[in-house]
Image: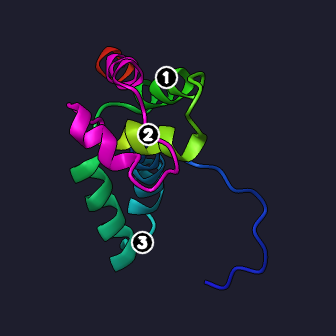
Amino acid sequence: MIVKSVLQEDLLTLAEVKDILDQIRDKRSDEEELGYELRRAIRHAELFSKGTAEESRAVVAELIKLEKMNLEIAVKIADIKPVNKDELRAIYAKERFTLSEEELDNILEIVFRG
């Protein structure tokens, strides 16, 4: 497949990708055999997605309201669902700022609620 131009670009959580790939699989399963890349992508999404698309999008919506948060990091946190502060610090390791203990607690609270 040759792509001529990108019409739209959105950041999706892994759970949302899984839903989209499931729809594609259901639509194509009657017509043709699934390609290798599509089968691998579906398998990856099934193995690593945590929760539903609605839950992950709700977590992203809550996280994006925080001060030191951007969409890329919010999606990454929703995909990984860190369980402790060390995992959360690893996500923020490339950023030029550090989070306080209170900010880390707020993020973890949002993840656990979602």
Q: Which residue lies under the disc numbered 3?
A: 32
Q: Which amino acid does label 2 sit on?
A: Thr
Tell which circle, 1 or 3, labels the residue nearer the N-terminal end: 3
Q: Tell me whether the residue at label 1 lies in contact with that at label 3, contact meaning CB atoms closer than 8 angstroms.
A: no
Tag in front: 3 or 2: 2
Mark 3 to mark 2 CA distance (whole Å): 50 Å
Q: Which residue lies under the disc numbered 2?
A: 98
Pick the front one: 82 or 30: 82
Q: Which residue is drawn at 25% across and 42% down?
A: 87
Q: Residue 58 carries which label?
A: 1
Q: Residue at x 52, y 20 (%)?
A: 62
Tag in front: 1 or 3: 1
Check the image and report above or below for 79 versus 83: below
Range covered by the magenta-colored residues:
81-109
Tell which circle, 2 or 1, labels the residue nearer the N-terminal end: 1
Residue 82 lies in quadrant: top left
Check the image and report above or below for 2 versus 79: below
Q: What residue type is labelled 1?
A: Ala
Q: Tell me whether the residue at label 2 lies in contact with that at label 1, contact meaning CB atoms closer than 8 angstroms.
A: no
Tag in front: 2 or 1: 2
Q: Tell me whether the residue at label 3 lies in contact with that at label 2, contact meaning CB atoms closer than 8 angstroms.
A: no
